Amino acid sequence: MAVAGGCSFPATRARTESNGRRPACRRGSHAPSEFGLGRACGRVRWHRRRVRCRLSVAETWRLIIEPQPRRASVNMAMDEALAESVASGCALPTLRLYRWSPAAVSIGRFQSVADLDLERLDVRGLDWVRRLSGGRALLHGNELTYALLLPLAHPVAQLGILDSYRALAGSLRAALAALGVNADPLKARARRMAAASAACLEQVSSWELAVAGRKLVGSAQCRRHGYVLQHGSLPLDGDPAALAEVLCLDTGGRERLRDNLRATATTLAHEMDMPGVEGELPDWQPLARAFACGFGNHAQVDWAEDGSQPAELEAAARLARVRYAAGAWLNLR
């Protein structure tokens, strides 16, 4: 897959000197942009000011494209560790793109574990985890998952929940366009579903992205401890109705959910060519880079491929063990 022009993915760590250290920042040495980015003493400093509901200024963010898929508990732990690092000012705003192995179901932070049929999950060899973000259940098979991490002082975070979804929707739409898919933002009033549904793809939330009314990207946010974490799921291929097989439903409810999901959700492979024709998906790295390129071009973000810091990896290993694989968190509700 050809990546759209104008993207720069530096091979070396951004802002480093020959000795491997980051250069010192002097107060005022980086003029604040329209979006309010300044730097002081190695920490990110945001100036609060009124902005449009759209990313529209050159910034530098960190891009992490995970080369290998990870377990569900490790993925969620990594997102939280990176978010804490961003909140503390030790890392730039971050976009992380990743995959899952084995395939897993994630449920929203406030969702009941009773929505899952744990025996069916076990029989199918599927993992499961509770996300830090809200929303409903998702089956993560062959997909691109994104985690966007912003400090609460960032102007997009200060727009509020709905307006921040709106601000980011344009860049996510551009990311899909870079993959050859023309998607449009949904509005919740455009289609009503049962509020009690356990499946994310059956729910309609404003500013999520759809193709011809069929949901392609589901997103959910979390705001805590000085950061905003937005999760998003882009199914690459597969059957959108597969989630119905592992939810706790009677026979009639399972069949109804299968029908609803096939009618209201879609995948990237289905949309890459003419409607109804499955496209041939590119390899992971070109696909992820094209997604990041489209996002960054629209948002006017320059990507620094700094990778995860050792302290972040250590924190993620601890969180995976004590939170995301622990019964107290998994059975929170």
Image: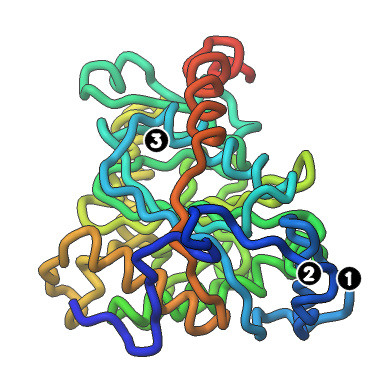
Report whether 71 appears left or right of 331.
Answer: left
Report whether 152 appears left or right of 140.
Answer: right
Q: Amino acid at mark 1?
A: Arg
Q: Secondary structure at mark 1?
A: loop
Q: Nearer the viewer, mark 1 or mark 3?
A: 1
Report whether 1 appears left or right of 195.
Answer: left
Query: Does the CB distance between marks 2 and 3 fall below 8 Å?
Result: no
Q: Quadrant of the N terminus?
A: bottom left
Residue in the image at 21% along x and 82% along y: 2
Residue matched to label 1: 48
In the rendered image, the residue lying farthest to the top is: 327
Mark nearer the N terminus (2 vs 3): 2
Q: Quadrant of the C terminus?
A: top right
Residue in the image at 48% along x and 70% along y: 303
> Does residue 193 appear in the picture of this structure?
no
Q: Nearer the viewer, mark 2 or mark 3?
A: 2
The local crowd at label 2, few if under 14, some if 14 to 19, many if 20 or more residues have their Cα within 10 Å, is: many
Query: Does the CB distance between marks 2 and 1 fall below 8 Å?
Result: yes
In the rendered image, the residue lying farthest to the bottom is: 5
Residue matched to label 2: 155
x then y, percent, for residue 108: 57, 36
Q: Quadrant of residue 328?
A: top right
The local crowd at label 1, few if under 14, some if 14 to 19, many if 20 or more residues have their Cα within 10 Å, is: few
Q: CA distance from mark 2 to mark 3?
A: 43 Å
Q: CA distance from mark 1 to mark 3?
A: 48 Å
Front position in the image: 327 or 29 = 29
The local crowd at label 3, few if under 14, some if 14 to 19, many if 20 or more residues have their Cα within 10 Å, is: few
Q: Amino acid at mark 3?
A: Gly
